Image (cartoon, helix red, strand yellow):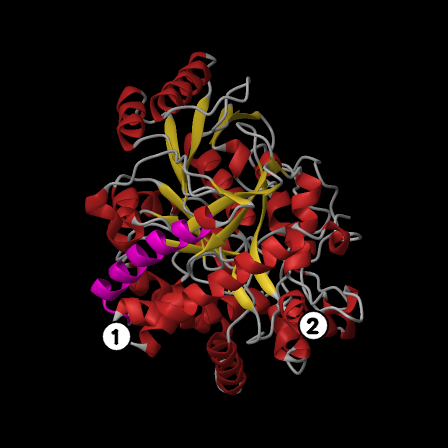
Amino acid sequence: MPQKLMRSRQQDAVEPYSFLARAPRPLEDLLAGGGDGRLALAPDDQRNSYGCTPFPRPGIVDFSSSTASSISSCAFGRAMAANAQLWMELTLNPDAFNDRVEASRDALRAHLGLREAEIVFSPSGTDAQLQALFLVRAILDTPLATIIVGADQTGSGTAYTSRGHHFSDRTALGVAVQKGAPIAGMSEDVRSVGVPFCDVTGRLRSDADMDTAVYAAVADAVSRGEKVLLQAMDSSKLGWSGPSAACLQRISTAWPGQVMVVMDACQMRLGLPQLQDYLARGYLVLVTGSKFFTGPAFSGALLVPAGLAEIVDKITTFPPGLQNYTTRYDWPSRWHGLRVSLPDVPNHGQWLRWEATLAEMTAYFAVPAVFRDSLLEEFDAQVSMQLVASGNLCLLKEHCGANNQQLSGEMGHRTIFSFVPCRRGKPLPLPDVTALYRAMGRNLSSRLSPDAPECDRGIAARICQIGQPVALSHRPGAALRISMSARLVSGCWDTSSVATQALEPILEDVKAVIQKLDFLIARPELLQGEAA
């Protein structure tokens, strides 16, 4: 055999496992890999762009699950064990990585009660939107209109992914791209239409107004001769939803075979019966493990209902530009025709992040449903009262979209509490709210004067992680968020089987967050340098 050909074949045999050269690195480095620039760690404090770390931070007060969370000790331990197990299995089984990802897929399917639905893993919810666009394009063909419901409260990357454009300057596979540029094979004959919660005048739409606007947008697209990807919203950044289930059913009935619904459930603040109902209706569903379930940032997935999964069996071509975003291991083994055209490069970090998420899910679903419901109901009532009692924080009481109580379970209770910080009764502008948010996550005791009281030093030193600011259109100011999470629920169950007793230390932490917010709002000089 010619030496050059022999060397090429040897390289082909080794390359799929080149990721193992990185395996001896610290686990936190592996957990921060396999994502785009948002996962990059700042050199000074090893936090990513969400203010979170890929290693446990047990000393912080954390209510940030509407944005992202630092990994827990339990989840970190599971990821470490899974990584070690992979190493051992690879000595005997060259397909061990594929088998481990399939096992993770099966575990997630079992937790969510998905039965025959398929799961496509992705680095983030934003990447999952590209996967959904690919499948809708392949099934419906083009021209295609992507209609985004709640466009003012979804991820910033959606403005790009909805048109098949690059949403960052680097993909999760480390390929340099131009942000905003078209993705080859994804953007042709695709346009995007946003239907925000607020109309062009800044007025908040009623639920009926939202239904009317969405239906009109779909009707307009169909009249243009376009097929439609309708991305509905189940829990936005502020916990809002739209359009109604009745509206979605009306659209599906009016234009069968012309509209596909993709449900954005990335917050995962929905009951399992509701999730299963979406799939039974034939909707694609976007989820993440890094919001309510507090897995490490960048663990996304696309859920494909059984009927559509059978159609995907027949798809054998893949857009060339999308091959820079996803690997064959992200896609179920049954879709061999799709997988063969994708890079044979394991996304080690993505798999480990999902393993960590599965640890949080296991702990959460081990808690009796009655306890979960009682705890979330009490949290809803108590946090609302605490925020209302603060003279500097204005609780957002408006809510778009209604839950189906029969399908919601414990998630029928509010788990995201949005509030507008004010100073002397006036809402703070977005730059000031951003500075306040960043200061909450830092120890600011060194900024106090030497003669400051010890109680003030204690408040300033407290590290509180909360939800990132959300710009508002329907009222002045910007919102911050305190959110309940699966990790807090399972932690409460470990403390006491009586919900009110178990919740006491959590409510004390909420008080501590509000105390620091009030402290910083009254001392704007401490926020200097945090707005950039």
Circle 1 residues within 10 Å: few <14, some 14–19, many ≥20? few
**Vertically, is 125 above or below 188?**
below
Query: Looking at numbered disc 1 in the image, what kind of residue is underneath it?
Result: Ser
Frontmost residue, 251 versus 529 = 529
Q: Residue at x 35, y 66 (%)?
A: 106
Q: Nearer the viewer, mark 1 or mark 2?
A: 1
Q: What is the number of the mark on residue 11?
A: 2
Q: What is the number of the mark on residue 516?
A: none
Q: Mark 2: which secondary structure?
A: helix
Query: Looking at numbered disc 2 in the image, what kind of residue is underneath it?
Result: Gln
**Vertically, is 255 above or below 392?**
above
Q: Mark 1: which secondary structure?
A: loop
Query: What is the quadrant of the N terminus in the image?
Result: bottom right
Question: Which residue is denoted by mark 1 in the rendering?
Answer: 497
Q: Main secondary structure of the magenta part?
A: helix
162 sits left or right of 247 in the view: right
Frontmost residue, 15 versus 123 = 123
Q: Residue at x 43, y 12 (%)?
A: 223
| Residue 27 position by quadrant | bottom right
Q: Residue at x 35, y 42 (%)?
A: 311
The residues colored magenta run: 367-387
493 sits left or right of 262 in the view: left
Magenta segment: does it hold 116?
Answer: no
Circle 2 residues within 10 Å: few <14, some 14–19, many ≥20? few
**Vertically, is 244 above or below 21?**
above
The percent coordinates of residue 222 (x first, y second) are: 42, 17
**Vertically, is 509 above or below 340?**
below
Q: Residue at x 48, y 66 (%)?
A: 509
Regarding residue 133, the answer to whether it shows in the image is yes
Gap between marks 1 and 2 measured at Cα: 57 Å
* First of labels 1, 2 by sequence position: 2
